[in-house]
Image (spheres, rainbow, N blue to C red):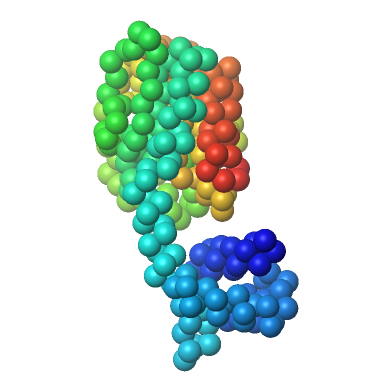
Amino acid sequence: MPALRRGLAVLRLLAGRPGPLSAAAVARELSLPRSTTYHLLAELTAAGFATHFPEERRYGLGVAAFELGSAYLRHDPLERLARPVLRRLVDTVGRTAHLGVLHGSEALYLVREQPRHPTTIVSDVGVRLPAHLTASGRAVLSRLPAAQVRALFPGPFVDRTGRGPRNLPALRRLLAVERRRGWAVEDGYVTAGFASVAAPVFDHGERPIAAITVTFRHVCETEAECGETWPDLATETRRAAEELTTRIGGRA
C-alpha cells in the first residue's frame, strides 16, 4: 500500500506540471529517497504510465495515463455522480436543477433534473448559452484567472434580453462580486421571467470544472426586484456543489 500511494503521488505530480520533471525534482517535491524515486519511475515507465526522455533526463506522463483518462471520460463519471446530487437538490428546493460546464465562452448543460411539476426553460441538456449571461457560466468564470477570462471574451458581447454584462470591465466587476459572495445570480439575463443561482464544483487541483444551477420563475420589472440574490436557495445549491466536489475527489 505505501508503494501504491507513492506511485499515485508521482503520477499526480507529473500530471500537475506543465512539462516533464527530473527524478531529482520528483524526489524533492514528494520527499522521497532518490533510490525509491528511480524505482517508482522505472515501474511506471515499464507499465506505460510514465515516459522517460533520456536526452533531457526527465519524466512525463505515458500513453497508458492518457488511455486511462480517455476511459474516464467515456464513462461520463461527472454526469453519473451529479445526477443523484441534483435529484436530492430538486427534492429539497422544488425547482429545476442543472449541471453545466464551461465550453469556450459558452455554458454547456450536461444534466437536468426537474420537480414533479416542471416549468419549460431554455437550458436543456446539450444546450449552449453565452457563459457571461448564465449563472452557471459565471460561477465557473469567477474562479478563473483574469487573463483566461480576458482571452475567452475578446468581444463583442452577446445580448439576449437587454440585461447582463455588455463588456469585459462590466463582466469583471460582476465576477468579483460573485466570487466574494460565493455564488452567481442570473435574473432575466437569458430568458425574461426566469432567474438562476449557481455554485462552482472543483476538481482535485481546486480548479472550477462545473457548476450546479437552480432555475425558477421570477418576474423582474423594477431595479429593486432585480437585485435579489436568494441566499437561502444559494445555501442549498452550494451544499450540492460541495457534495459533488467531494464525490469526484475535488477540493474547494
Residue 35, by quadrant, is: bottom right
Q: Position of residue 122 (x, y in %)?
A: 27, 24
Q: Is residue 73 visible?
A: yes
Q: Considering the image in quadrants, where does the C terminus appear?
A: top right
Residue closer to the observer: 176 or 88: 88
Where residue 76 sits: x, y (%)?
37, 43
Viewer-proximal residue, 83 or 110? 83
Question: Relative to 63, is 144 on the left or the right?
Answer: right
Q: Residue at x 46, y 36 (%)?
A: 81
Q: Residue furthest bottom?
A: 55
The quarter of the rendered structure image containing the N terminus is bottom right
Visible residue check, residue 221? no
Q: Nearer the viewer, residue 87 or 169?
A: 87
Quadrant for residue 192, please give it.
Answer: top left
Q: Is residue 145 above or below residue 181?
A: below
Q: Residue at the spot x=36%, y=31% of the render?
A: 111
